[in-house]
Image (tube, rainbow, N blue to C red):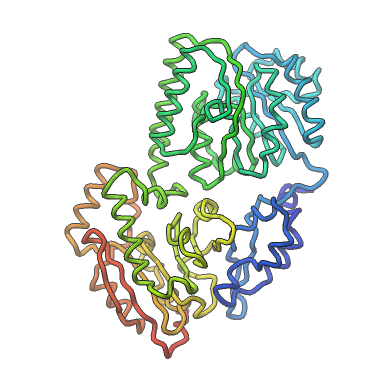
Amino acid sequence: MSRSRREHHGLGAHREQLRRRPLVGAHDACLPAQALDQLDQVEREAVIVVHHEDHVGGRYHAAVIEPGLGRADEQSTVLSIVVPVWGTRHDLPRLLPALRRALEGVEPRSEILVCASDTSVRPIVEAASAVFVESKGSGYGDILQTGIEAAQGDRVITMDADFAYAADFVPIIWAHRDDAEVVIGSRYVRGAVAEMGFSRRTASRLLNRVYRFGLSVPFHDLSSGFRLYRRRVLLDIQPLEAHGLDILPEIIVKAQCQGWRVIEVPFWYRGAEPWNRVRMVQFGLAYLETLGRLLSLRNSVRAADYDNRAFDSWIPLQRSWQRRRFEVVHSFMGPQASRSTLDIGCGSSRIVQTLPGVVGMDLGMHKLRWLRAPGRHLVQGSLTRLPFADGAFDTVICSEVIEHIPRDQVRLEELVRVVAPGGLLILGTPDYSRKRWLFLEWLYGKVFPNGYVKEHINRYTRAGLQRDLESLGLSIQNLRYVGGSEMIFSARVPAATSGIAPAG
């Protein structure tokens, strides 16, 4: 069976049934409860987003499966164990037989891949009925990447080659396979044990704390090599740039930025040989170089949880700005907050997280993936062609979106089309006629040169945007500013109309 068919196998019947369901209103944008009840735990995790497909007869049809999160068929490889051999130290003669015994009680449809640049270990690997994969690179990251690329399992466990006892932990980490897409065998969470030399332990804890707090990620052990992944995650976060041990935090941070769930479970780590001072300095410099690259990604709007982090930012101005925006939008919604609402370009919106029944829509699958939760309604779609019927929502929110889209592709009439007669459109964007905003954006660009500033390609002014809204027949109900420079309009659709059809 081909890989594409494998990925959808377990959800095929439900997918075909649900993809034909037309979206005729706000509630129809969600997966029907009776259909959800028929899905098991793994399948429920896959049903997170509605994909816009085509426009037929005035209604939009959709599929409700994120590709690649289905169940594998009975003949495919379910689990790949990837063991990178880095340097001369390994315990393969004991590790490989122990792994084979552990897999018999865990998942028989499995494979063991041993990856190394040194072919001298090949006889040991083949004698244990495992697969040897030669790496062209000699760094830990290069060797691990070789194993990842060769793995065929829907899930992948990675572990070091010099700890035979690690095989005993395979059933434990495997038991958490449905709890998250990435499971870290952590040395530094409650219940874990880390037996290693003082200098190595100190250096490891220090680097992990720098990464944890510097990148605002909730993980204690980003450098553990014992992990369980969905293979889809490892494909999604490519390309990986690190060549050494710093590939380990790079994988975790990129998975977090792509919206995948990552958890830690306690691991008993029984020390390796101590590192000398030169080696620790080399690793430390590599980790710091990778930290610089990841800081740029973590603090950019590309990160799935960018908006959520900004709401609780340690930077007072950013935190107060986000919270003031939330207050203004919520006040504009008023009593309609409990009715049908669409948040366009929701990102990791607090609106979607805090208000029941809000449908969140974003073009970025990774942002929707981060937001997924039971009872939360998420739709992947484009502002230029909304996958909803006319008049589907009482309130439509579009905050801090239109400035990122070329002017000729912004179709405000499409926003108005999905608002019910008498409903509200809440629209926010920076006011480029205000000197305060121009100064703040210039300053932000200097402090954070890799931030969002370059992405603001569509510059609106208050007069121009108000004119555009009124030309569509909307009446301006209110206008408030955040920080004296970001304007948020509340505009009402006439009660006598059934929405404005998109041009063309």
On screen, residue 168 above or below 367: above
Q: Position of residue 190 (x, y in %)?
A: 54, 30
Please, which residue is most extreme toward the front here?
A: 191
Out of 253 and 27, give the one closest to the viewer. Answer: 27
On screen, residue 182 above or below 319: above
Q: Residue at position x 29%, y 55% from top?
A: 321
Q: Residue at position x 54%, y 62% from top?
A: 378
Q: Position of residue 502 (x, y in %)?
A: 46, 78
Q: Position of residue 449 (x, y in %)?
A: 30, 43
Q: Residue at position x 58%, y 22% from top?
A: 193
Out of 459 and 249, give the one closest to the viewer. Answer: 249
Q: Is residue 66 left or right of residue 363?
A: right
Quarter of the rendering containing residue 52: bottom right
On screen, residue 407 above or below 353: below
Q: Position of residue 45 (x, y in %)?
A: 64, 53
Out of 400 and 56, give the one closest to the viewer. Answer: 400
